[in-house]
Amino acid sequence: MRKKIKAKDWLLLVLTIVVSIIIIFPVLFAFMSAFKSNGEILADPLALPSSFGFDNFQRLFEETNFLEAFTNSVIITICSLFLIVLIIPMAAYPLARQKGKFYYIVYVYFIMSFMIPFQTYMIPLFEQLDTLGLLGNLYGVINQYIAFSVSLSVLLYTSFIRGIPYTLEEAAEIDGANKFTIFWKIIFPLVTPTTVTIIVLQGLGIWNDFLLPLLVMSGMDVKTINVEIYQFIGLYSAQWGILFAGTVIAMTPMIIFFTAAQRYFVKGITAGAVKA
């Protein structure tokens, strides 16, 4: 016997289709525009391209520093994520396991950064970066991405670690393992879903970020992919075809990455929520 579809199911289906169209439309628009000339884009933005040539992509690499900017974005994203995953779990482990006011205060201190808007400490932050020689280079941007990721990453790691039974660590201690070995051989592999979640969340944020690289590397020849694309827009004209070609190349790695990792991402979010 076929199950009767209720009115609310139809409503959810319609809403899902509408939201899907809203989300997919900018992506399809960018892909179509990447193969169109400036004239075609301005004459009829929603029309299909007359041909699927790669002129815009060729001009993108010949007339701009897009390849260098792409390389800078890759370096910043990989180095930031590597250091985030290396450092922050080690900070979260004692905060999740140790009792006492000191660890609680440190935990709250990390989490409090959620509540402080970036604009309130932007100027003193850049003065500190300038003093430390981190303004105008990739090191300063990587440093800040690690700092900005502390609050969310500590929250997720501590929530997950608190759900891991103590008995695993006690058994390892009986076998002679020290805290360092217990963390890297037992705890760190078990928090893999959280690590993947953080890599996806922070990776998307770092790769797509525009403001921080623009401010930290302002006036320098070093640019990230989004800042380089921004340069395509002039005061009186815009190279829309090249801009959309750059946009397509910029978002393609993240679409592939998120599609490949979304199963682990959902698993990590769910696991952390249940065990918190």
Image (cartoon, rainbow, N blue to C red):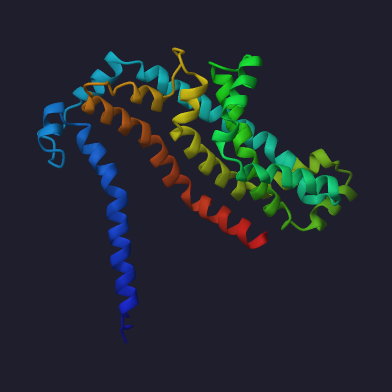
Does 69 appear above or below 162?
above
Q: In the rendered view, does 26 fall on the left or right side of 43?
A: right
Residue in front for this viewpoint, 228 or 192: 228
Which residue is located at x 31 percent, y 71 percent? 11
Expressed as whole percent of the image width and height from the top left, the position of residue 45 reads 15, 38
Does 192 appear above or below 2?
above
Does 132 appear above or below 83?
above
Q: Residue 151: name its quadrant.
A: top right
Quarter of the image where the N terminus is located: bottom left
Expressed as whole percent of the image width and height from the top left, the position of residue 106 reads 77, 43
Which residue is located at x 82 percent, y 57 percent? 167
Does 270 appear above or below 8?
above
Quarter of the image where the C terminus is located: bottom right
Residue in front for this viewpoint, 245 or 45: 45
Q: In the rendered view, does 169 fall on the left or right side of 196?
A: right
Which residue is located at x 55 percent, y 25 percent? 141
Expressed as whole percent of the image width and height from the top left, the position of residue 36 reads 16, 31
